[in-house]
Image (cartoon, rainbow, N blue to C red):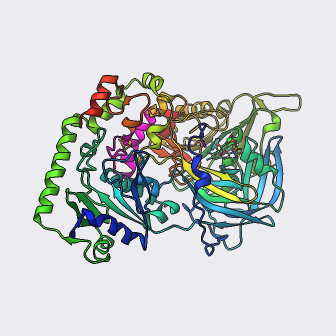
Amino acid sequence: MSDHDSNGSNISKRNNSYSGCSKYSGQSSQGSYLPLQAEIVDIDVESPNTYLISLALPSGVDFSYKPGQFVMVSVFGLGECPISITSTPTRGSLQLCIRLAGRITNGITDSRIGDVLGIRGPCGNGFPLDRMKKDILIAGGGSGFATLRSLINYIVDRRDSFGKVAVAYGARTRQDLYFMQEYKGWQQAGIDVSVTVDIGDEGWKGNVGMVPALIDKFNLPAGSAAICGPSVMINAVASKLMARDFDHSDIYVSMERHMKCGVGKCEHCCIGPYHACQDGPVFTYDMVKEVL
Amino acid sequence: MKAFLPNESLIPWLKDLSSSLEVIAPVDVEGEAVYQTWKGQPPALVGNTLSSPIEVLMPRTEVLFRYVQDSGRYTFDEPKVPTRIVVGMKPCDLKAVAILDRIFGSEPTDHPYLAKRRSTLLVSLNCTDPGPWCFCAIMDSGPDAQEGFDLALTDIGSGYLAEAGSAAGVLLIKGCSSGLFLEADGSHEASRDILLENARSVMAEKYGDRSVGHLRRAIRSADWEYLGRQCLRCGGCSFICPVCHCFSIADLGVPDGERVRCRDTCLLSGFSRMTNGANPLGSIGERMRNWYLDKFEHLPERTGLIGCVGCGRCDEICLAQIDRWRLEVLDERSRQQRQQHK
Ligand SMILES: Cc1cc2nc3c(=O)[nH]c(=O)nc-3n(C[C@H](O)[C@H](O)[C@H](O)COP(=O)(O)OP(=O)(O)OC[C@H]3O[C@@H](n4cnc5c(N)ncnc54)[C@H](O)[C@@H]3O)c2cc1C
Ligand code: SF4
Ligand code: SF4
Ligand code: FES
């Protein structure tokens, strides 16, 4: 709800007539707002405030998704919020990477193995793999890296369909870096991986600085790019890429917006004429550069 | 099909309808016409209502589903949708239904809206006496309903000329107790035409200078900073608008409870604020601009229809007395003039 609670009135006066017969617990269809129930089968800790949650959907449910899509996750009683799918459809499980940010994200991470979360989706468009060029630069900053991991592991699993691929990723400190145990595998798949932190320490031997600085290190032909992170970072990376002859319509940006419905109705996520939940979250840079 | 419903048959007809349907009609509540379940009171079928019957399809608050927990798993129950008939809906509100149909009916469709829409019959009442703020004629959404109604009524003095717009509408005439509807003749239609023409010219005289083209230019050049300072951020203009459809979703109750949605508005500061505090619509001026852009640029782009039906409610309700079309604050004198002049 927005700040002023001017719309929460009438609740007690509501007419509670429920159909006894339409009990539901099966397949969710888009637009019905009824979630699926997904069981938490594994919980891992990615950083001091970030958890990797693996989910099992009810058997028989068709849940096909693309890298870059997200789901509306609910903890019943607390509400629903958008979370990127961090796993790749090329592997079995459905994984979410949750950073503690408030009520719902805390509720998700307070859950235990065996508990259920509500899942609606997949929502949004995802990365347009059929339209993207084969050489891909992936740049992520902070928790925005969760959605890019889906794309990276997808590329690893379908390596022959892609050309030169490079990953530039930055976090605040060494402790905030996600998916560290996977970088080696990415490199073994021939992906150029470069990581940086804003604040270094004695234990850190790698780069210190901002993500855009990493771009200079890559020797990459003008292909497509997938970026997710803070606006400043997106703009800086995009301008470096355009200087390297990347077309602005080949630069794909995953946008964050406040979301409530996830199906293009509630208007919370609007970016000009677009709904980030439906027309996005992935946009070409030229579509969104004015609001970045 | 056309028929004539004499004044004395109106209440018997509503009684007839209410034996099989929930009838929603405007009734007098402390001097204000409010759409409610009709329980035999004299219906307040006059003028425009401040609150829109669109609330039948898009309630201020509604339950999406109820969740019930049992050993860590949930069952969900969706509310039953009653079969209803709205009597007296004005053409402007009917046009708003057409816009909402396109919004909620586009893929992925919004089931809670469509379920209510499919089980609601609409009887419209053409406007022979436009209110002081009405300019539907300029927006092409009144004073007579063009489409989307099951039955359209026009008050021609001695009774109502009824015109069916759907098979259900024909049944509303034919299926009721005999003797209520009489045959319509040419004189009924002639009276309707004169009354509607008069309503049209009243609005043209008063609001003829309004045009969407002008407004679009005004949006580009308006001083949003200034208008933002005038606005009291009450959200009234949105909550009262039959086309505004922003909503929020929240859970009420642990471990069992209800997921509810309630109307929201893009004019409030928290509407687009993100977890990290960043707010793409950070100032009230930007939010007001977004309100206009959505109605007059983005919605037409998405649905082919302009997001305003000329009901005048936002002008009437605005505490800051902002003239919604000139995008300036009205002085007290012109406001009073507008209210008096009918
Ligand atoms: C497309 C998309 C993908 C995302 N992916 C991830 C992810 O993979 N991992 C992750 O940890 N976080 C992700 N987020 C951010 C996450 O949705 C917010 O952190 C979350 O909504 C915060 O909810 P809360 O109740 O914990 O916090 P609160 O601040 O208490 O949020 C209150 C309410 O505001 C809304 N809200 C606030 N901020 C946001 C926001 N930034 N985006 C959407 N709604 C918001 C929520 O609906 C929530 O109900 C994503 C956001 C978007 C838009
Ligand atoms: S914008 Fe104002 S005049 Fe137009 S439909 Fe909404 S409330 Fe009515
Ligand atoms: S009704 Fe007037 S004061 Fe209230 S939010 Fe709208 S413009 Fe602002
Ligand atoms: S989240 Fe509701 S319109 Fe996008």
Instruction: Please identify the dominant SS of the magenta region.
Output: helix
Give the quadrant of the N terminus of chain A.
top right
Which residue range is magenta in the image? B289-313
Residue A50 shown in magenta: no
**Left or right: residue B119 compared with residue B305:** right
Residue A93 showing in the rendered view: yes
Residue depicted at 14% across the width and 61% down the height: B189
The residue nearer to you, when weighing B7 against A103, is B7
Q: Is residue B209 above or below residue A65?
A: above
**Left or right: residue A252 compared with residue B129:** right
The number of numbered badges drawn on the structure is 0
Residue B108 showing in the rendered view: no
Give how far across and how far down residue A135 sits, in percent. Answer: 59, 47
The residue lying furthest to the right in this view is A202
Residue depicted at 71% across the width and 66% down the height: A57
Give how far across and how far down residue A271 sits, in percent. Answer: 50, 41
Q: Is residue A210 above or below residue B156?
A: above
Residue B311 shown in magenta: yes
Give the quadrant of the C terminus of chain A.
top right
Ligand 3 sits in which quadrant?
A: top left
Q: Quadrant of residue A56?
A: bottom right
Give how far across and how far down residue B66 sits, in percent. Answer: 65, 62
Q: Quadrant of residue A37?
A: bottom right
Give how far across and how far down residue B101 sits, in percent. Answer: 41, 58
